[in-house]
Image: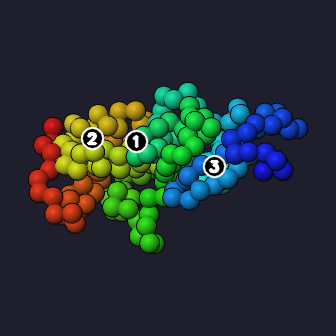
Amino acid sequence: MVPGQRLGQRFEGKTGLKTQLTLRVNGEARDMMVPAHKSLLEVLREDLNLTGTKHGCELGECGTCTVLVDGLPVLSCLALPVELQGREIKTVEGMAANGRLHPLQQAFVELGAAQCGYCTPGILLTSEALLVENPTPGRQEIREALAGNLCRCTGYTKILDAVELAALRMNANAGIQGTGSRA
């Protein structure tokens, strides 16, 4: 921060207009100077070295760059960091807890749902948001939730199976009965 500058204040530097801001990423507050033109995707990868979030189309069409903002899927290639101050941003790096994979990550590994892995972070986070909103989704609901996440390697069957398996395991741990219908 420049001496005498207030949080959120803008200043003109050698690389153009920058804004001092604090982003809360994976539960940790991060203070930084961010060029006004940088997307959240670029800040996550280039400034915070969180490279799990992938560059895809950079047009908001593929879902590869999906992160969660306050628990909801957001395309980070279209989001500006300055608009996300005070909100919780979660990347794939924030899914595992206490050295243990998230049940979705574990199911993807076990069922071979990740092929090349490029789309996997966005699919995992979108699936997590779905399971928080609906702990017992049917196959059609999973398809609909993942409709904005493109995968070029799979036929999606193993991905759908992995989300269903994770839901079953998470529900068993939480004591929730029933699952959605397979359609």
Q: Which of the marked residues, 2 or 3, is nearer the chain's N terminus?
A: 3
Q: Quick one: SS at disc 3?
A: strand
* Residue ID for mark 1: 72
Task: Indicate the position of residue 131 as horizontal and vertical percent values.
Answer: 28, 49
Label 1 and label 2: CA atoms lie apart by 15 Å
Q: Determine the residue positioned at 54% across, 46% down.
A: 86
Q: Determine the residue positioned at 18% across, 42% down.
A: 138
Quarter of the figure with the C terminus = top left
Mark nearer the viewer, 2 or 3: 3
Q: What residue type is labelled 2?
A: Ile
Say above or below: 38 vs 27: above
| Front residue of 5 and 12 | 5
Task: Indicate the position of residue 145 as horizontal and vertical percent values.
Answer: 32, 37
Neighbour tally class for label 1: few under 14, some 14-19, many 20 plus, Cα within 10 Å: some
Q: What residue type is labelled 1?
A: Leu
Say above or below: 172 vs 6: below
Toward the bottom, the furthest residue is 99
Q: Which mark is residue 22?
A: 3
Q: Residue 142 carries which label?
A: 2
Q: Determine the residue positioned at 39% across, 59% down.
A: 105
Label 2 and label 3: CA atoms lie apart by 34 Å
